[in-house]
Image: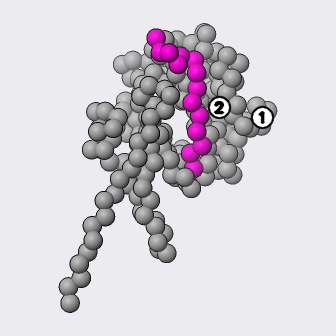
Amino acid sequence: MTQSIQKKEFSMDFAATDFKDLYIIKPKIFGDSRGYFFESFRDDLFKKHIGDITFIQDNESKSSYGVLRGLHYQLPPFAQSKLVRVVVGEILDVAVDIRKNSSTFGKHFKIILSDENKLQLFIPKGFAHGFIVLSDFAIVNYKVDAFYSPEHDRGIDAFDPFLGIDWTVPQEKTLRSPKDSILPQLKDAVLL
């Protein structure tokens, strides 16, 4: 007896934000008693909705509660676009517009990314990026379209009062690297 197999169309939704070129991506989840399946990335849909970006590297980090990474960016010609998602746990993900001629310059966008909501954030070149871990620990995976270059690596103080970011964890309970603890404020940063 031959069984007909129904082919499902796997897809994802792309939602624009109030920041030019910054998108929230929500994959369609297919689940049953065995677990779930979803496409975390599809090049054809990404190019259709966001543009022709070629990711060349995948990065992953594991961090415990209160770890704050960022705000990071790279200068041209190594400026990076990122596609961020959480594999385990929950983070508050933040992107700060540092494009000098942008109408949203100096403003920030934040979103909860978690293993439960499976949302992703596409951050284009021209944004500084950071996140803080809200769960016991989190595993964060992100794609980039340029390699890391120490000479072009820059950052902005996550607690710059001008940015006014509420990280939801009190500053004294955050854990930052020595490098991230001495980043300049936006007014003193070398920008794109």
Question: Identity of the amino acid at label 1?
Answer: Pro
Q: Which mark is residue 190?
A: none
Q: Residues within 10 Å of mark 1 (few under 14, many from 20)?
A: few
The image position of residue 11, as x and y in percent, is: 35, 53
Q: Position of residue 90 (x, y in %)?
A: 61, 48
Give, as a three-letter code, the residue at label 2.
Answer: Ser
Q: Is the residue 80 above or below the residue 26 in the image?
A: above
Q: Quadrant of residue 115?
A: bottom right
Q: Are marks 1 and 2 in contact (CB under 8 Å)?
A: no
Q: Is residue 56 visible?
A: no
* Residue 16 visible, this angle: yes
From the viewer's perspective, is residue 11 above or below residue 158? below
Residue 114 placed where, x, y %?
57, 50
What residue would you read off at disc 1?
170
Residue 97 is left or right of residue 9, and the answer is: right
The residue that appears at 72% across and 37% down in the rendered structure is 168
Q: Percent x, y for residue 62?
A: 58, 47
Nearer to me, 99 or 141: 99
Q: Residue at x 36, y 19 (%)?
A: 77
Q: Which mark is residue 177?
A: 2
Kindly report the distance in space between the C-alpha atoms of the residues bearing marks 1 and 2.
16 Å
Q: Quadrant of the C terminus?
A: top left
User: Dot 1 lies on which element?
Assistant: loop
Task: Provide the residue span drawn in magenta.
Answer: 101-114
